[in-house]
């Protein structure tokens, strides 16, 4: 991977995250929500790949990566994650 490709992708992801916040509101969401948003767009990405639609693939790549960037920001804040489904605090361990 060239430095130019990496920087182009990362710049587009950051721009997509900014646009998402401009459209949806500039607020943090729980980690579970960011993961669900990314997962939803992963399905769209798979569909675009299967259709060999390169423009849609790029769009959905950014729509998957931007919420992952937001999720990364949340984990960098540290602390436990409250499971909204049953109120448990969890720290995922493998």
Image (cartoon, rainbow, N blue to C red):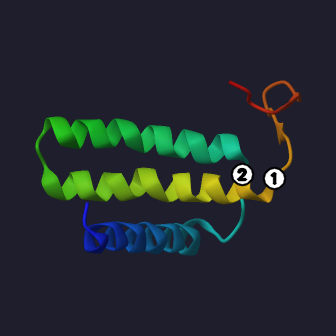
Looking at the rendering, in which quadrant would you find the N terminus? bottom left
Q: Crowding near pointer 2: few (<14 within 10 Å), some, many (20+)?
A: few
Closest to the observer, 75 or 63: 75
Closest to the observer, 79 or 4: 4
Q: CA distance from mark 2 to mark 1?
A: 5 Å
Residue 2 higher or lower than 56, as above or below = below
Where is residue 24 drawn, in percent x and y?
Answer: 58, 65
Please name the residue that numbered disc 2 is placed on.
75
Position of residue 81 in the picture relative to residue 56 (left or right): right
Residue 36 higher or lower than 94, as above or below = below
> For the point 56% across and 75% down, which residue is it?
22
Question: Do callouts 2 and 1 mark residues in contact (Cβ within 8 Å)?
Answer: yes
Residue 88 higher or lower than 43, as above or below = above
Q: Determine which quarter of the picture holds residue 46.
A: top left
* Residue farthest along the front direction in this orientation: 2
Please name the residue that numbered disc 1 is placed on.
78
Where disc 2 sits, the SS reads helix
Q: Determine which quarter of the picture holds residue 10.
A: bottom left
């Amino acid at each position: 991977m060239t430095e130019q490709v990496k920087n182009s992708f990362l710049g587009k992801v950051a721009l997509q995250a900014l646009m998402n916040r401009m459209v949806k509101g500039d607020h943090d969401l729980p980690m579970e929500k960011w993961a669900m948003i990314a997962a939803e767009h992963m399905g769209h990405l798979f569909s675009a790949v299967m259709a060999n639609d390169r423009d849609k693939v790029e769009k959905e790549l950014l729509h998957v990566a931007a919420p992952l960037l937001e999720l990364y920001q949340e984990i960098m804040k540290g602390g436990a994650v409250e499971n909204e489904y049953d109120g448990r605090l969890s720290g995922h361990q493998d």
